[in-house]
Image: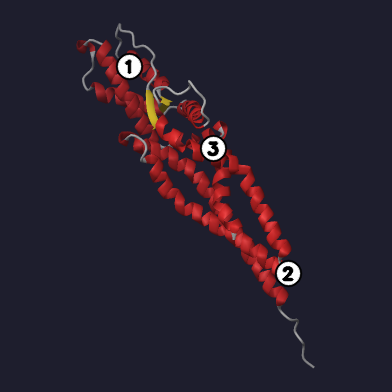
Amino acid sequence: MLSTLLVPIGITATWLSLRVDSTPAYVDTVAPLAEDPELRDALAVEVANAAVRTIERRVPAALLPDSLDAVVLASAQAVVENDGFPEFWRKANATAHREFLAIVHERQGVVADGWVHIDVGPLLDDVFADFVERFPVDVSLPSQSVMVPVVPESRLEQARGAYQVLEGLAWWVPLLWVGLVAVAVVVARGVRGRLRAGAACALGVAIGGALVMLLTSPTTDAVVDQVESERQDLARLVVEVVVASLDSTALAAAVGGLVVGVVLFVSSLLLGRPPDAGHP
């Protein structure tokens, strides 16, 4: 049925509009990653590398501690494990998401260097402060942005058309689905036929939800493949947690559609059974 074909589009478009196209909803989705050790370790390495480069340029070699890399990495790990990191992560992702929206909605002059970035500069400031406290040096370690590129603007521009089409369908597809279901139920003959028509539509929702779940994994791989190879692990963490919310929506549709479909179909069978004649 046509209504079944609309289900995967409707689920994806509605999820895109409510979860991906809203900065507060997106930030709420990725916020739990702040507790993920893999994410913290990846950002600690990014910050430590930037800190070591700056310190080696500005601090005389004679004043540097032995094993500078290890000392700075330990400091960076302490920074990403402190109580302020979750709030930093929310703010950094809000900024990155606004850059993303600037591209897909064709707003100009927002994205730097053709990339969507996560700026970990505030974490670098904390590492510098810890270094100066532990190894007093009369050298300025200035604040600076440390941009971790995530997705190239060119890739998002290629997907812009499809993104905008899906966003536009977020309200129309569900309404069209409801209309088609209503027509199918109304034109069916008798109560039994209408129950079966409703059951068919509900099972179509279950099939559509299952199809979306089957496609989320290859879609995740395709998105991550667009990112620089050395940052794919970090990108995968973010993409997977966002796509997981689509999986949850699709699962709810699949289970709900299956339950409703079975109930309606069984009801149609019971309705069609002749009453017991009884015994003399």
SS type, badge 3: helix
Name the one closer to the observer, 170 or 255.
170
Residue 39, given in percent of the width and then of the height, sits at 39, 35
Which mark is in front, 1 or 3? 3
Q: Would you name the residue on which mark 1 appears?
A: 131
For residue 112, which quarter of the picture? top left
**What amino acid is at disc 1?**
Phe
**Which badge, 1 or 3, comes first in the chain's sequence?**
1
Instruction: Work out how far the residue at label 2 is from the one at label 1, CA to CA, in angstroms.
Output: 79 Å
Q: Amino acid at mark 2?
A: Arg
Question: If you read the primary sequence from the N terminus, does the residue marked by circle 2 or circle 3 appear first?
Answer: 3
| Residue sitting at the far bottom | 280
Q: Residue 11 at what x, y percent from top left?
A: 56, 48
Does 116 sit above or below residue 224?
Answer: above
Which mark, by number, is residue 160? Answer: none
Q: What residue would you read off at disc 2? A: 189
| Disc 3 target residue | 164
In 3D space, how far apart are the residues under numbered discs 2 and 3 (Cα atoms)? Answer: 40 Å
Q: Amino acid at mark 3?
A: Gln
Residue 157, percent from left and from top: 45, 33
Image quadrant where one finds the C terminus: bottom right
**Residue 169's x, y, as percent?**
59, 43
Residue occupying the far right of the picture: 280
Task: Assess whether mark 3 and mark 1 are in contact (beta carbons under 8 angstroms).
Answer: no
**Foreground residue among 55 and 239:** 239
Q: Which quarter of the rendering shows the N terminus?
A: bottom right
